[in-house]
Each structure stands twice: as C-alpha cells, then as structure tokens.
Image (tube, helix red, strand yellow):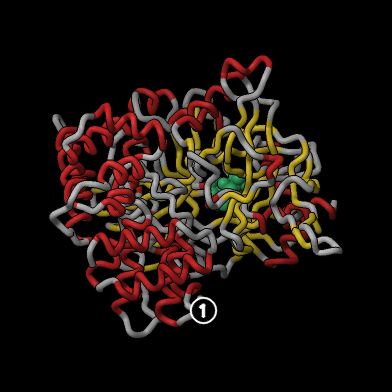
Amino acid sequence: MTFKRLAEYFHKLENTTLRNQMTEILAELFKEAPQNEIGKIVYLLQGRVAPLYEAVEFGLADKMIIRAIADGLKVDSQKVTRVFKESGDLGKTAEKLKANVKTKHNLNVLQVFGTLHKTALAGGEGSQDVKIKLLGSLIRDLDSLSVRYLVRIPVAKLRLGFSDMTILDALSWMKAGSKKLRPQFEKAYNVRPDLGLIAETVKRHKENNFNIEPRVGIPILMARAERMGSGEEIIDKIGRCAVEPKYDGFRLQGHKMGNKVELFSRNLENVTHMYPDIVQGIKKQVKTKEAIIEGEAVAYNPQTGEYLPFQETVQRKRKYNIEAKAKEIPLKLFAFELLYQTGKNLIMSEYVERRKQLEKIVARGEVILIAQEEVIDTPKRLEAIFLDTVSRGLEGVMAKKLDGIYRAGSRDFNWIKYKRSYAGKLDDTVDAVVMGYDFGQGKRTAFGIGDFLIGVFDEKLEKYVSIAKIGTGLTDEEWKEIKIRSEKLKAPEKPKNYEVDKIMGCDVWITPKIVVEIRADEITRSPVHTAGRIMGPTKTGSAIEVKEAGLALRFPRLERFRDDKNPTDATTLGELKKMLHRQMKK
Ligand code: ATP
C-alpha cells in the first residue's frame, strides 16, 4: 500500500467523530492492507513504530521538526516557524509549504515505516542531525496530505481520536461484519498487548479462535480489583477466599529470562533501570529459569524495620541518582502472583495453584517477600484481619477468589479490595484525567493557572466526560506541577474525544495524559457536568435540555499524581456509577 493511500484513510478518520464510522473506516483499511503490512499500519495509526511497551520514542522537539521541514523542502527555518505560528500545527505547516512543490516519489508504507523506525532508533552523538535528515527526506518524497500526517507522528500529535478497543472492534468488523469477535480479540490483547501482532494474527488465521500465549519480556496487562465495603458483602459474593494485605506502594511485573530481568509498571512502561535492587532480588531469589511474577513494591526502612508511606516509596521513581536513592530507600517486593513459569502459562490456573507455585519458586531472602495470606470463610474473620491490617497503617485488604483465574487487563470480582472508610461519604478515591485549565485570577495569576477541569472515561462513548473543576486545595508546588505538565500537552482546540458542557469550557485544552487521584466528600448530581448526563428534546421539540443531570464530585481535592496509570486506566463512568450506588447504600 502506498503511504498516500494510508494518508487518505488518516484524513477520513480525522474528519469523523462518530465511533461507529471510525470502526468501519478502519475495517475497510484493514481489509485493504496486505498481510505483511497490517501490523505496521496499526503501529502508525497509534502514532508509533513499535508496540506501546517498547520504549521506542522519537526524541524530537518541535524545533527539530521545523528544521526537518526546512531541510526537506529547502526553505528557510524562519519561514517554517512563521507558518507554524499561524496554525499551531506542524502537520498543517508542512502540508502548506509542500502544497506547491512537485513530488517525484510515491513511497509505500513499508518504506516510510522503515525510515521512521530508523529515525526513532538513531542515538548517540550527532543523532539529532541524522534524525532531521531522515525525516527531511520523507517530507521531500511524500505528497502534501501525506506530509500532514507524517509530521504529526514524531511529535505524538496524530490524535485520530480512537482507542485500542476501537482497533479491536475494527478487526472484528473486518472478519465478521460486526463487533462480535471483539471480546475474543481483547482476551488475546490482554495477554500480549501488541496491537500490531494481534492484527497480523487475525489477518493470517482463517478461524478466529487462535491462542496467544504470554511470553517473558512482554508485559501482560494487569488484573484489577472490584471494590466492596464489608466482610459480609465479600463472603456473600465469593465465599471462602484468600485475604492479603493491600500494600500501599506501586505494582511491578517482573520478567525473569535466565540471567536477565525486566520490570514493568502498571501502564506497561519498562522501568527496569529504576529499581536495580528489585532486579537483583529477582535474580537471586526466583528459582526457575523463566518466570513472570507480580507484586507491590514498598519502601522499607532498614534501621527501624518499618514500612514507609507512599510519599517515601514514590521517591524511588526517578531518572537520575538511582543507585544512591536505592541505598537510602531500599524497596521490598511483596509478591502475590505467578503468571508464567518456564514453559507453563498459569494465567488460566486457579488462584490457589498459582499461589502454591509462587511459594515454591521464591526462595527466602531480603528483597522478595511473599505477600501474607490467610484463607478464611467467615465475615467475622475477614473483618478482624481488616482491622488488624488498617491498625498497622496499611490501606486495607484484598480478597481473592480461590478458584479465580488471573483476569489480565480486567477489573473483576476475582479480586476485591476493601479499603478503610474515610471521613467523607465516598469511600474511595477517583482517578481522573486532567482535560484543561483556566488562567484564573488573584494570587495564582503568577502561576498562570487558576483551576483545572477533570473527567473520567466513558467506555461506551469512548470519550472523556467531565466531573469537576478544581480551583482550591492544592499547594503552590502542586499548582506549579500541574501547569508545567499541562504546558507540554496543549491542544490547539478541544480534543475530539472530550464531551464537555460549554459552561465548563477551558482557556487551555490539553490532551488526555495526566492522571490525578482525587479525594472527594461525595458524588453529587450536576447539570453542567457530562459524566452520565442524558440530554433530550424539550416538550415542544424546539431545543435540547438536560433530562438527567451528570455525576460530579463534591469538594474534590488532589491526592497525588498517578504516573503509573494511562488515561484509559483512569476511573470509568461505569465505576463511578457503582461508587454512587454504594454511597447511597450507606
Ligand atoms: P487503588 O487506586 O485503589 O490503589 P488502583 O486503581 O491502583 O487501586 P486496583 O487494581 O483497583 O488499582 O487496586 C489494586 C491495586 O492494589 C493493585 O494494582 C496493586 O498495585 C495494589 N495491591 C496491593 N496489595 C495487593 C495485593 N495483595 N494483591 C493485589 N494487589 C495489591
């Protein structure tokens, strides 16, 4: 397929906001794509040249792209900058400058992908110049519409407005003319979150029930827990179960391949280099050639033997000064899962079996500890463990269904979290996405930010819907931090996948990236927030009005930044509704 043809599809996708239409356009594209190209096309649709969990990044700032455009089109950088200032969009800038230039070549998808891949991989001294030359050559050899989309890839601004799930829907659509195969494809994706590989596999197999096995070195999407508020509720739901403390640190998935160990965070970032102590611990204590284990990493004070609060633990997440911090704040990994063991996939095994194997392969030692566990069958015992755990300063407990499989990538009652209730009515925090901010007045004008809008993900609409605007309760440091982070994510207009009432509009929109954990007193109803809001025609049919107010947060406060979560892992509208339901029962 020529890249020009692919760009025509990009164009169609850019011009629709309707999810079903996007699915059909993608299905058409996948049908047309040859077997050996579909995987690469899928990466390009995500604005990448590798699966999400591979740290292949372009490392090119706007300034460098301007140089690449100037280099490719043999125009002055200042001219490019001028055009860029008008539109604020590098893609349109390159397209405009290219409009009157004849193009000799018509590159195909594989050629463009190959050059982009080389651009991303170029490293070391002089690599910026190499990257500029490579990108410049593509700009020279492609037509104007192609250039618009090409240039947006290295600056992560492709923003076609669909999620990984839409790609899975489209693959199903291609195969079956409906979305009915999506659950099957999603299961494969949860075990190997590589959309390129899934697309190739779907295209290659005549039947649809292909099997995808986990592989060491490739992260598995992590299972998540449902919430409940009492021992009785939990026993009613899953009966006899295993109860473990809910440690308050961060989740790590460790992959051992012989003498090599890799670590992944919840959002599949490869974080191996950050935690050399855990890497050593796994090498030393995991007594099998290959393994995928999971646990919670928590800071530990070797002098007092105490577990430290999250604020201390999180200091270990850093790019510099790693070894010194590791000495100062050593981590322990409380292991609670074994998903794979030399040649044996354990994801579909029962919890008790996985736990038994985990205990067998982890030798006693300093760094990897097996999570405490007790199998119980009465609410009374569960409450007793809960109270004891909370009194030791932990968050609460996790109850696990004894015959439950590991539900990769899903939130499910195989795991139930039971956390201590807080003073307010709402017993859990909400992980929300920052959608935009206003400049504001008064004291904070100096920071350039007065309030910010947050939202949750509506999984049916595949859009972010608003739940609160927060203007108080942050420290000066936190305001500065939000502003700095937002600065890099400015969008020229309201992103396509935001559903926001006009009244809640923002001075500056930002693309969904920052996830913040928010504590609030309760969930209320509000006509100006769009989470779960239902609109309908007025009696006379002459206008649209609010039929059911949306969900909103009362007295929202920032608890912490959740860098370990992707925006699509943030709290969903469905979860928020369940939280409201639980709140009403109190
Ligand atoms: P929360 O915001 O409530 O901490 P979350 O949104 O980060 O939860 P969930 O999957 O809902 O993620 O909650 C489970 C999290 O609790 C896991 O991701 C893991 O990091 C942590 N955890 C701590 N102890 C355990 C345990 N024993 N078993 C499983 N997960 C545990």
Vertical arrangement, residue 49 with respect to residue 490, above or below: below
Q: Quadrant of residue 413?
A: bottom right
The residue at 54%/22% (across/down) is 480
The residue at 17%/52% (across/down) is 103
Q: Quadrant of residue 273?
A: top left
Q: Can residue 187 be seen by looking at this rendering? A: no
Residue 147 or 166: which is nearer the viewer?
Answer: 147
Q: Residues within 10 Å of mark 1 (few under 14, many from 20)?
A: few
Vertical arrangement, residue 316 with respect to residue 410, above or below: above
Residue 300 or 310: which is nearer the viewer?
Answer: 310
**Is 271 left or right of 79, judged from the image as shown?**
right
Report the residue marked by disc 1: 180
The residue at 77%/62% (across/down) is 536
Residue 566 or 212: which is nearer the viewer?
Answer: 566
- Which secondary structure lies at badge 1? loop
Amino acid bearing label 1? Lys
Residue 585: image x %, image y %? 84, 55
Tag count in the figure? Answer: 1
Q: Quadrant of the N terminus?
A: bottom left
Residue 37: image x %, image y %? 24, 67
Residue 14: image x %, image y %? 44, 56
The residue at 63%/21% (across/down) is 475
